[in-house]
């Protein structure tokens, strides 16, 4: 997934509009105009740091006069007491940017930390962990960026950049073969350069997919370990294989050891705890 500056700026402007609107009245009323100061971003949790690049852009967007001195980078291990960066400039601007910077970095660091823990569990296997679309509306870009920082692999970003035929699509289309052939015809008719992945619920559906072909990956949904191994024998290396459904930190290693290429986990983005960071004035 490509992180585009214009997408980040659009997010920042929307977030500032939500938070600031016609002014940060607390800072405007209590902090003297023209006052200049410095603050440090402190770590209060253990994990993997994420969101540093974004924080720099937020500070610069809030006020071009804000200058940052970065001491740690995205992907670094962090522990309580670490200083991530210093920011210096107008006091009012530092305060206006503070909560947006912290909200983003805390969420991103939580996701990066969980992702890294899963990546570590997969070490020594061929398997990689994928994220999903089970993200927070409005900040999907940040959450998927955090997965990448943590060492995971981004799946499709949205509905627009891949065709992923799942159970409901197949049922509404009248079956796996109908759905797959219709998708292939659609891509061709609309001159689209997007991949097609398909989910199967059992070995019979898998056999239908293997008859039709034309996919970049097959997703095995809620298969047992034994059924996954049986499916892999049928696929025989013709397509990359993803396991999905019911995969947790406790069983992810067992799924990986079946021989699948990928495991997808909504857990990376929908069940994480934000890590504690704070921005404190340097007196």
Image (spheres, grey):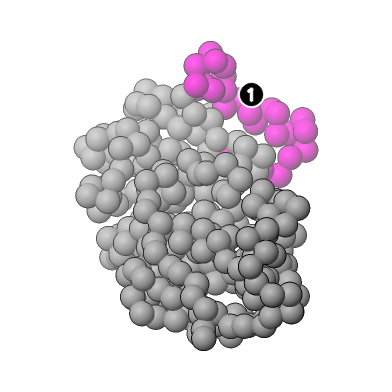
Q: Quadrant of residue 35?
A: bottom right
Magenta-span inclusion, residue 39 = no
Q: Is residue 213 visible?
A: no
Quadrant for the N terminus in the image: bottom right
Q: Quadrant of residue 52?
A: bottom right
Most frequent secondary structure within the magenta stretch: helix
Which residue is drawn at the image coordinates 68% and 54% (left, top)? 20
Which residue is drawn at the image coordinates 64% and 24% (left, top)? 182
Q: Total of numbered circles in the picture? A: 1
At which x and y percent is residue 199? 45, 32
Which residue is drawn at the image coordinates 57% and 16% (left, top)? 173
Taking 196 as reference, is 204 above or below it? above
- Of residue 264 and residue 77, the one placed in the foreground of this image is 77
Residue range highlighted in magenta: 168-196
Left or right placement of residue 3 versus residue 256 in this view: right
Taking 150 as reference, is 204 above or below it? above
- Of residue 139 and residue 91, the one placed in the foreground of this image is 91
Left or right placement of residue 222 versus residue 149 in this view: left
Mark 1 Cα within 10 Å, few/some/many (few <14, many 20+)?
few
Q: Quadrant of residue 64?
A: bottom right
Left or right placement of residue 98 versus residue 11 in this view: left
Regarding mark 1 in the picture, which secondary structure is present there?
helix
Which residue is the site of mark 1?
A: 182
At which x and y percent is residue 207? 41, 27
- Of residue 99 and residue 106, the one placed in the foreground of this image is 99
Q: Is residue 97 visible?
A: yes
Which residue is drawn at the image coordinates 57% and 66% (left, top)? 98
Magenta-span inclusion, residue 186 = yes
Left or right placement of residue 31 versus residue 236 in this view: right
At which x and y percent is residue 247? 31, 43
At which x and y percent is residue 190? 77, 33
């Amino acid at each position: 997934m490509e992180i585009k500056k214009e997408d980040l700026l659009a997010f920042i402007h929307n977030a500032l509009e939500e938070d600031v609107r016609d002014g940060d009245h607390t800072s405007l009323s209590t902090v003297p105009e023209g006052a200049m100061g410095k603050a440090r971003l402190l770590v209060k949790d253990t994990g993997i740091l994420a969101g540093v690049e974004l924080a720099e852009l937020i500070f610069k967007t809030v006020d071009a006069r804000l200058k940052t001195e970065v001491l740690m980078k995205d992907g670094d291990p962090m522990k309580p007491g670490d200083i991530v960066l210093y920011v210096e400039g107008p006091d009012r601007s530092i305060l206006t940017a503070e909560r947006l910077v912290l909200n983003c970095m805390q969420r991103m660091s939580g996701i990066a930390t969980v992702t890294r823990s899963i990546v570590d569990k997969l070490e020594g296997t061929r398997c990689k962990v994928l994220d999903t679309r089970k993200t927070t509306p409005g900040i999907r870009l940040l959450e998927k960026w955090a997965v990448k920082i943590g060492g995971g692999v981004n799946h499709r970003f949205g509905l627009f950049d891949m065709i992923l035929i799942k159970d409901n699509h197949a049922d509404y289309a009248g079956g796996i073969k109908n759905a797959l052939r219709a998708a292939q015809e659609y891509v061709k008719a609309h001159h689209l350069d997007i991949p097609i992945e398909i989910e199967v619920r059992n070995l019979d559906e898998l056999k239908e997919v293997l008859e039709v072909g034309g996919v970049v990956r097959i997703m095995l949904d809620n298969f047992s370990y034994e059924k996954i191994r049986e499916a892999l024998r049928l696929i025989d290396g013709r397509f990359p294989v993803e396991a999905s459904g019911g995969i947790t930190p406790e069983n992810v290693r067992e799924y990986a050891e079946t021989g699948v290429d990928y495991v997808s986990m909504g857990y990376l983005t929908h069940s994480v705890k934000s890590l504690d960071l704070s921005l404190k004035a340097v007196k």
